[in-house]
Amino acid sequence: MALGKRSLNYQWLSQVFIGWFFFLAINLIFNIACKNTLVHFIGIPLLLKVSYFAKASVYTLLFAALVALCFIPRFIKVTDNKKLALTISVIGKLLAFVLITFFFLSWGFYSHSAQFLGIVPLQSIGTESFAHFLSLGHIEPAEWNSIIIAAIATTVVLGSFFPWLLESRPYETRQTLCLYSILLIIAMLFIGNLIGLENTIDLSREKIDVSKVKQALSHKTTPLMFLQSDIKTTLLINRLASLPKGKLELTRRPVISMKNYFKGYNAKTHKRPNIIVILMSSLNAKMLKSFGGEQSVMPNLDKLAMQSTRFTNAYTQSSQLHYASLGIMNSRYPMYSLNTYYYPIATTYPKVSLPYLLTHIGYQTALISSQNEYWGGMLRTFRPTAFHKIIHTEVTEEGKLYKDGLANQKPEYLKRMLGPYKVGKVDDAVTTDMAIDFIKKTDKHTPVMLMMTLKNSSYPFRYPRRPKDNPKATIMKKLEKLKRDHRKSLQFVDVQIGKLLKALKATHRFDNSIIIVSGETGINFDNTNALERPSALSQAVIHLPLIIYRSGAKASVKTEPAMQLDVPPTVLALLGLKPHPSFEGVNLYAKDFNLNRAMYFVTQTQSAYEYAIIKKGYKFVINALTKINKLFNLSDDPNETMNLATREPKISRAYHQQLLGFISAHVDYYQTPALHDHDYPPRYKGINR
């Protein structure tokens, strides 16, 4: 029976508020259950957490109102046609189910990746398989089934049980519920807007970036607060398309076949040393005595470095994981789009990489990693034939999940992997054992190309017998513990590097190897907060040690500007091969090396959309979110404390124009499939000048 207008208002409002309380309770439960959420932030006062939870409650109220709107056919007669009324009711419940599924699915994503569902993953549903969409958040079938069951149960509770319960209550009860709910909303708005960070804790003395803390809190409270921020960011970033394009002279490099590239190659006269590439998380020069560090944290790596070429002015291409870790293999700048880029299944641009080239001259190639190489679609940047063997957190030699495949072979591997602080990554001891096994099983006369990624030194810095956190510790004590954990995790990684080097010597491969070691990204404990790894293009994050060991070569120190994307062309040169036209890096040992080359950097994340150029000791940064450009003299100001953009307008304009040219040239190339059949990414004046 249709309700009266007066009764209807309170009935529907009561439904909204009951749903609101329901979702608030679920948000609170998930905040407590999941790590790295608002509740678990270290050193943040309770009042501040209450403030941000109160702010998030407003978004939850809007979500509850939208869900309740889907059930409104229950409260009002929309038509006398019973079939049409039933259809409208079913559609409403389906829409409610979709909204509720999004809510639980977003928390599912967060439980694995510490990030809620945003615009880019949602857009991928239309272009990718749903299985890939779930893999972005590492959601397994059992979890997906749990999400569906929870969404169905919530839809039934909100769409049938609560309305029935409210209808059975007296009118005055619903009226009172609405009154108290409105008072609670007013209180939450008051708390959310009046309790500010600066009034509750002074973090300036702790060297904590207040704006970063606020941004982190807003991104880690509820799915709705994050989605609102993500939509706002996406709309803002899209405005970059209207920026003026830099005017640089482009040089097109035509696509060539492997046959033409290797024309004249003779396996008998060309060298074929083993190629070992090792990347690790959160590495910086302070941890290596060979790079001037004060502590002996990584003795095995230091010993190798003292026999190698040490590049003290080297950089990764990005502070963003799935942008940074690929350049050392494909020698390509990660400038594909104006928004965060997940490498799609189908691409038209050429996929040439160092391992792909080496397979053509008899190398046995392997990618053995402690991380999920499906993240961001990283594996899709390689041709299927680039690696003979791929082992990472989702694939074993048998093509099964680690937890399924390794459990049947070596139970201790499972214990290591699923123990505390693994955060979905494989223990580096497991990865190293797999790498050693690959080396030992490969015919001794066959050269190997091994790519390893080690992750124990990524936050939260995992190592054996790690002590538990003290929830009552001050923020400075927490930071000191994080620094200690970081050192200990690097020591653990160093042990694995020592094991690998020992295996190379035992198999008589060490004396005929090129070994490259660097970091994916660095970490900065001094100028940022410890709540999350910084994503801005700060020197502490992108400036990394680069070590290249060559059998028989003298140890040396090079201060030339170097990048990880220079590794593939450098390796080719050491093998006696000409540069491949698809590579955007340069040979680091070239006699005509340009000391004034330009180096470019990209990061596109929720907390930082930045583009940078480093050239002649200056660093110019475009921040697409704040619209504030920065210029630093790295020679005089390596910690980037003084913005010279207004003091040096001539340099700023020149670098701004060149950086815009880099952005527009690359985006135009990748967004124009017609170019991909005959051209590699463009080179232009400024790319190495």
Image (tube, rainbow, N blue to C red):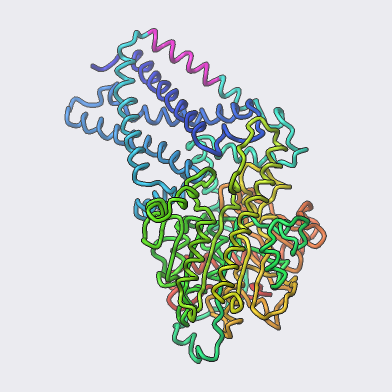
Q: Viewed as shown, does residue 174 lie left or right of 680?
A: left
Q: Kindly give the residue lying farthest to the right in the view shown.
A: 636
Q: Viewed as shown, does residue 81 lie left or right of 320?
A: left
Asked if residue 257 shows in the view, the reply is: yes
Residue at x-position 52% and y-position 21% = 185
- Magenta residues, as a range? 172-186
Rendered view: 96 above or below 125: above
Residue 623 percent location from the top left of the image:
64, 53
Residue at x-position 35% and y-position 33% = 150
Q: Kindly give the residue lying farthest to the front in the view shown.
A: 506
Q: Main secondary structure of the magenta part?
A: helix
State which quarter of the image contains the C terminus.
bottom right
Residue 340 percent location from the top left of the image:
52, 54
State which quarter of the image contains the N terminus.
top left
Q: Is residue 202 magenta?
A: no
What is the quadrant of residue 629 in the picture? bottom right
Front residue (pair 562, 54): 562
Q: Is residue 179 magenta?
A: yes
Rendered view: 624 above or below 5: below
Asked if residue 664 shows in the view, the reply is: no
Residue at x-position 49% and y-position 18% = 182
